[in-house]
Image (spheres, helix red, strand yellow):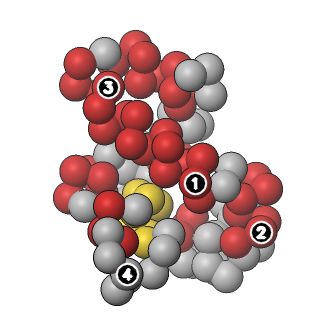
Amino acid sequence: MNNVAEMGCIVCAMKFIFNPAEIHHINGKVKEGCHFQVLPLCFEHHRKGNDKEPISRHPYKKRFESAYGTEKELLEKVNKLLVLVNEHPTDALDILRGEN
């Protein structure tokens, strides 16, 4: 989870902005494997409670996913970035742009 948090907010990163992140568990905090299904989100995108840009995941999941992608889609980007960021930084930028 530390490596994920160090990436900064995935939603901000898709706009090429770095903001420190806190961890959002997409499937709760007690299920088996739940700590491997986390998103790095800044305070504003995680739990500030905005229903307009920047839209918060809590409590506006549907608006958040409509604007930024589903949690599953964002998790796929995070996982790809974790693998690529050190080895192929250009490919990592393509993932943020939605090109891979």
Identify the residue under disc 1: 72
C-alpha gap between disc 1 and disc 3 = 18 Å
Neighbour class for label 2 at 10 Å: few (<14), some, many (≥20)?
few
Q: Which residue sits at x=52%, y=27%?
A: 95
| Label located before the other in sequence (3 or 2) | 2
* Residue 11 in sight in this render: no
Position of 91 relative to 40 (above/below)? above
| Label located before the other in sequence (1 or 3) | 1
C-alpha gap between disc 2 and disc 4 = 23 Å
Amino acid, disc 3? Leu
Q: Which residue sits at x=47%, y=22%?
A: 93
Q: Secondary structure at mark 1?
A: helix
Q: Residue furthest front?
A: 32
Identify the residue under disc 3: 84
Amino acid, disc 2? Lys
Q: Contact (CB < 8 A) between labels 1 and 3?
A: no
Q: Contact (CB < 8 A) between labels 3 and 2?
A: no
Q: Secondary structure at mark 4?
A: loop
| Label located before the other in sequence (2 or 1) | 2
Q: Which residue sits at x=39%, y=42%?
A: 79
Amino acid, disc 1? Lys
Amino acid, disc 4? Lys
| 78 to the left or right of 16 | left
Q: Mark 2 or mark 4, which is nearer to you?
A: 4
Q: Which mark is residue 31?
A: 4
| Label located before the other in sequence (2 or 4) | 4
Quarter in which the N terminus is drawn: bottom left
C-alpha gap between disc 4 and disc 3 = 28 Å
